[in-house]
Image: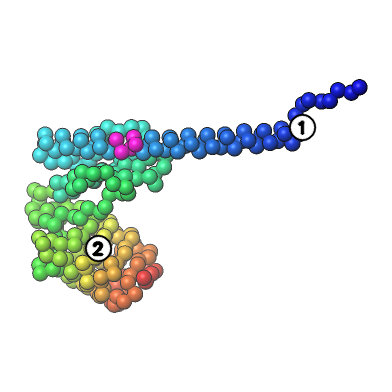
């Protein structure tokens, strides 16, 4: 009499393999989730520790440091530090996932998701009258002994409590003389309070990207002429003066 084979069939083996694969996938997903949460917890801890270090430095020196290179952090965290107007913002991202970003600032002292908001340029860098920026100084307060005004410009929505509504003709125009390169703006963020930009207001700079706020109704002739812009976003209702942008610039309306 023949004995019946008690081994597994091919179908049973396949089922076992599939089940093992599913369990392995669940384990990997669970591990990645736990690992990711642990890295974010470490990132937030680095931010809190960095804020403490900056606070100690400010107490001992009367100001925050100009750079954050000495801040201690873990190997999985990348820090980006910005100091402005006797304040700071410290952002942290995961080295393995740069899109995961949190920040803390001296203004709030709390950890928030996302990158640091743009910090407005010191109001003492601007010549300002009746809501209009009429010039931009080399140094704060137009005093050579004061800190230099930055070339990465973030125009504030208000100066001394008055809304910034216009940029005057030739206000931040760069004269192309022997040392013009040291004075050229390299980036520009405009406030939503702005309604008009005057003739040649930002000509002869090195601005490479630009979005015109929806509040702006007029842009003067040659306003952004001779900048290395390739495209610019402009509200559809804005009146644009002749040659406000170079001929090769693509104007995207919104």
- Quadrant of residue 201 within the rendered picture: bottom left
Q: Is residue 11 left or right of residue 72?
A: right
Question: Between disc 2 and disc 1, whose residue precedes?
Answer: 1
Placement of 101 over or under 216, stated as above or below: above
Q: How is the image coloured?
A: rainbow
- Quadrant of residue 203 within the rendered picture: bottom left
The residue drawn where x is 19% and y is 60% is: 156
Q: Is residue 238 visible?
A: yes
Location of mark 1 (residue)? 9
- Quadrant of residue 193 within the rendered picture: bottom left
Magenta stretch, residue numbers: 41-46
Rendering coords of residue 35 (x, y %):
43, 35
Discs 2, 1 touching: Cβ within 8 Å: no
- The answer to whether residue 196 is magenta is no
Callout 1: 10 Å neighbours few (<14), some, many (20+)? Answer: few
Q: Is residue 185 left or right of residue 246?
A: left
């Amino acid at each position: 009499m023949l004995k019946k084979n008690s081994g597994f069939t091919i179908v049973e083996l396949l089922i076992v393999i599939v089940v093992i694969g599913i369990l392995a996938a669940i384990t990997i997903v669970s591990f990645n989730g736990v690992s990711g949460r642990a890295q974010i917890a470490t990132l937030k801890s680095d931010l809190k520790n960095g804020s403490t270090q900056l606070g100690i430095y400010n107490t001992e020196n009367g100001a925050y440091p100009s750079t954050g290179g000495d801040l201690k952090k873990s190997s999985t965290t990348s820090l980006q530090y910005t100091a402005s107007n006797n304040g700071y913002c410290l952002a942290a991202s995961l080295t393995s996932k740069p899109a995961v970003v949190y920040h803390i600032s001296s203004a709030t002292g709390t950890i928030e998701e996302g990158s640091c908001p743009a910090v407005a340029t010191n109001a003492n860098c601007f010549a300002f009258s009746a809501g209009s920026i009429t010039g931009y100084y080399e140094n704060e307060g137009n005093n050579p002994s004061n800190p230099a005004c930055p070339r990465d410009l973030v125009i504030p929505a208000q100066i001394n409590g008055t809304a910034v509504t216009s940029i005057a003709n030739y206000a931040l125009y760069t004269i192309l003389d022997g040392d013009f390169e040291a004075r050229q703006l390299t980036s520009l963020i405009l406030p939503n309070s702005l309604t008009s930009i005057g003739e040649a207001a930002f000509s002869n700079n090195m601005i490479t990207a630009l979005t015109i706020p929806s509040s702006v109704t007029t842009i003067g002739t040659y306003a952004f002429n001779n900048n290395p812009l390739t495209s610019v976003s402009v509200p559809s209702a804005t009146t644009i003066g002749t040659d406000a942008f170079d001929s090769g610039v693509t104007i995207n309306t919104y």
